[in-house]
Amino acid sequence: MKKITVKGENIVNVPNALSLYRIVAFPVLFYLVLTQQETWFVILLCISLISDILDGSIARYFKLQTNFGAALDNLGDICTYIMALLGLFIFKWNDIEPHAWMLYLFLAVFILSYIVSFLRFKKIPGLHLFSCVLAGYMQGVFFFTLFVFGFYPWLYYLALGWGTLAYIEKIVVLLKLDDIKIGVKGLYWMMKK
């Protein structure tokens, strides 16, 4: 297999293929929501959620982390988030509506982190802070549980509460960094240096 590089990084690898799957699945999931095909939507969304866990784990374990892969993963995450949220609004809103304030708070902080990144660096924040990775896993478990088993308020508040705190940390880290780079673990580790 030919080695394809971008800025000296080998971009052809399994983690990037998994991230690419989530991007390619985006229009298919969108179509399934529009046509009210909840069963197929749930199946493909769950595959996207599992691929999100796998790509980062594989990249870290086999030392395949690259700036390109981090940005691709982030784009795949955004696509998956958008579809999970759209599915939540279309298929599960009756369960969520009484607790919507937490969702709105999380979304405000999440979007603010992207605004800060674009204003400071003019690019997607390809940071994978420990707190944000854990938040992603928790939210993946929440969405999987919501669509497969039903709504559990404690899991909803745990996933979105932790996510809100994680993205607040991400905003602070973005304000302290000179440039976005892979390998930033979190604010605690930045302050130790």
Image (cartoon, rainbow, N blue to C red):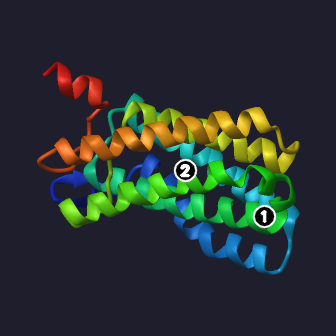
Q: Name the residue under label 1.
A: 41
Disc 2 element: helix
- Quadrant location, the N terminus: bottom left
Q: Which of marks 2 and 1 is nearer the N terminus?
A: 1
Q: Is residue 38 left or right of residue 136?
A: right
Q: Position of residue 62 (x, y in %)?
A: 38, 32
Label 1, residues with CA under 10 Å away: few <14, some 14-19, many ≥20: many
Q: Position of residue 18 (x, y in %)?
A: 52, 53
- Quadrant location, the C terminus: top left
Q: Is residue 88 visible in this depiction of the protein?
A: yes
Examine the rendered structure and indicate whether residue 62 appears above or below residue 145: above
Q: How far separated are the C-alphas under marks 2 and 1?
A: 23 Å
Question: What residue is drawn where x is 69% and y is 67%?
Answer: 86
Q: Of the numbered discs in the image, which one, if any, rests on residue 106? A: 2
Residue 110 vs residue 27, the one in the foreground: 110
Residue 21 vs residue 129, the one in the foreground: 129
Examine the rendered structure and indicate whether residue 121 appears above or below residue 69: below
Q: In this view, does 46 lie to the left or right of 105?
A: right
Question: What residue is drawn where x is 46% and y is 48%?
Answer: 14
